Image (tube, rainbow, N blue to C red):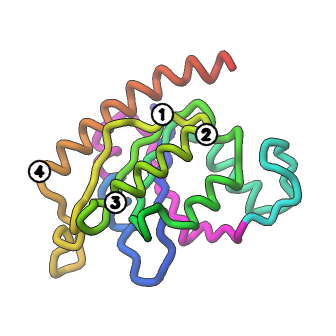
Amino acid sequence: MYNLKIISSTVRPGRKGPMVAAWIAAKATQNGNFNVEVVDLGEVNLPMMNEAHHPIMKKYEHEHTKQWSAKIEEADAFIFVTAEYDYNYPAPLRNAIEYLASEWGYKAAGIVSYGGVSAGTRAANSLKSDLATMSVVPLSQGVNFPMFAQFINDKEEFVPNETSHKAAETMLRELVRWTKGLKVVKENK
């Protein structure tokens, strides 16, 4: 079994990211190849980068950074759940990524994005580019929710359609494949 961290990126009041993260976490658990943990940046609550040393040095001074480092280091793979704000992914996610360096490397990442007409795809594309600089392999397969509020019912439950379920299953199959391959790469770095 691979350790999968599902990172929910939104932190603002009224956010819907946690319900999207819970949905993909259930799908990942059903896949049977992952030990799944949802990591909610709203709960992690990292301050804006406040370490004196560059992350590549791993000379962390603050306990919150040490805990974040350990959490990301133990992961074999990621799924990032991101909204789209102003044509990009949320600033707290960028901050969380930039807190660390080597902990991210040689791991695969799926992306579940949501938004209005664009379905969060601009945020996902920007995130893919930034993840690649951290030696993360972002999958081309993803899950995108256009006008995502349509998937929230009267009981405030997130209820995706069959197309979304199929997209998630495809992404998870690819995540297993890449995670398996990258374990070999990581061992040989």
Q: CA distance from mark 4 to mark 3?
A: 19 Å
Given the image, on which type of amino acid does mark 3 rest? Gly
In the picture shown, does residue 157 fall above or below 78? below
> Which numbered disc flags the more N-terminal residue, 2 or 4?
2
The residue that disc 4 covers is: 162
> On the picture, is 142 further left or further right than 178?
left
> Which numbered disc flags the more N-terminal residue, 2 or 1?
1
> Which numbered disc flags the more N-terminal residue, 1 or 4?
1
> On the picture, is 2 further left or further right than 121?
right
Given the image, on which type of amino acid does mark 4 rest? Glu
Look at discs 1 and 4 and give the one toward the viewer.
4
The residue that disc 2 covers is: 133
Given the image, on which type of amino acid does mark 1 rest? Tyr
Q: Dot 4: what SS?
A: helix
> Which numbered disc flags the more N-terminal residue, 3 or 1?
1
The residue that disc 1 covers is: 2
Q: Which residues are magenta?
A: 26-48
The residue that disc 3 covers is: 120
Residue sitting at x 75%, y 58%:
65
Residue sitting at x 84%, y 43%:
57
> Which numbered disc flags the more N-terminal residue, 2 or 3?
3
Look at discs 2 and 4 and give the one toward the viewer.
2
Look at discs 2 and 1 and give the one toward the viewer.
2
Q: Dot 2: what SS?
A: loop
